[in-house]
Image (spheres, rainbow, N blue to C red):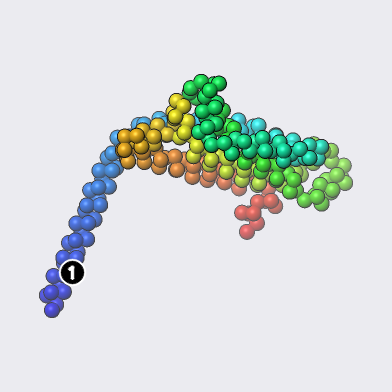
């Protein structure tokens, strides 16, 4: 009986070793295949980040002042109506936005940046608007009581207290942006979508993953970077992460 148990254990151990060896051999082959695409991954990742930086940066530059403007009492009655115009860029499928921008900007980087810019505007503008409108009225009354002008109240009271919500909108917008950039390949703008869509067309799983995995990693990396910036920039009293 002990001999049979020992024999069974040896067989089981041998089977496990063979399985692990097969997994290792397959993984080694995949690593070698991924290495084949490494120069393309590096080059296209730079293109991907460049498209995100330009379109996302333009969206921040436009959407934050727009959100500030819509939060002013003199304009607030039209804020929701104007916000619906920005919602068009999110409601219409991004590929359709890129196709429409391509119709009057041609093929290449310019229509891709414009389409990504339009698709990224709403989260930033809405979070800026909501963050500013959510500032405690008591703080605003106290600021007015000590003689602050409307501009001083905006810069010293409203914006510092709304920064956390504004950065949350920027994080959401950039995550959407990075995940949408692969579609820019379809209109000749490059990016990691070149590996993704070409891999799909050729039924090449490794090529497809060589574009999909870096895209996911870039989204996580950018999200972590924005979260770190938020932690460092947002005042202690309005950062929930620092209050815990």
Q: For residue 169, what is the image quadrant?
A: top right
Residue 63 location, quadrant: top right
For residue 10, side relative to residue 199 (left or right): left
Which residue occupies the foreground of this view, 99 or 171?
99
Image quarter where the N terminus lies is bottom left
Q: Secondary structure at mark 1?
A: helix
In the image: residue 69, left or right of residue 223: right
Q: Residue reaching furthest bottom?
A: 1
Residue hosting label 1: 9
Q: Position of residue 67 (x, y in %)?
A: 70, 38
Residue 209: x and y in percent read 36, 41
How many residues crowd mark 1 within 10 Å: few (<14), some (14–19), many (20+)?
A: few
- Left of 161 or right of it: where is 188? left
- Say which residue appears at 49% left-offset and 42% top-offset: 219
In percent of the image, x 27 and y 40: which residue is there?
32
Q: Quadrant of the C terminus?
A: bottom right
x and y percentages locating residue 229 in the rendered image: 59, 43
* Residue located at (73% from left, 48% from top): 134
Q: Quadrant of residue 213?
A: top left
Task: Determine whether 22 is above or below 46 in the image.
Answer: below
Q: Is residue 73 visible?
A: yes
């Amino acid at each position: 009986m002990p001999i049979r148990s020992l024999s069974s254990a040896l067989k089981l151990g041998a089977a496990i070793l063979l399985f692990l060896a097969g997994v290792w051999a397959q993984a080694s082959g995949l690593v070698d295949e991924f290495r084949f695409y490494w120069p393309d991954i590096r080059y296209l990742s730079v293109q991907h980040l460049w498209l995100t930086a330009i379109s996302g940066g333009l969206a921040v530059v436009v959407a934050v002042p727009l959100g500030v403007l819509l939060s002013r009492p003199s304009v607030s009655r039209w804020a929701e109506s104007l916000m619906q115009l920005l919602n068009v860029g999110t409601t219409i499928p991004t590929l359709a936005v890129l196709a429409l921008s391509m119709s009057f900007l041609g093929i290449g980087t310019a229509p891709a940046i414009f389409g990504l810019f339009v698709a990224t505007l709403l989260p930033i503008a809405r979070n800026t608007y909501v963050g500013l409108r959510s500032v405690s009225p008591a703080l605003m009354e106290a600021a007015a009581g000590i003689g602050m002008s409307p501009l001083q109240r905006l810069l010293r009271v409203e914006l510092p207290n709304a920064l956390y919500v504004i950065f949350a909108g920027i994080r959401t917008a950039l995550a959407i942006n990075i995940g949408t950039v692969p579609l820019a390949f379809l209109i000749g703008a490059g990016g990691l979508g070149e590996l993704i869509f070409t891999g799909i067309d050729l039924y090449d799983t490794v090529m497809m993953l060589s574009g999909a995995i870096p895209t996911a990693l870039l989204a996580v990396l950018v999200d972590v970077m924005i979260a770190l910036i938020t932690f460092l920039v947002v005042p202690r009293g309005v950062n929930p992460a620092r209050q815990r």
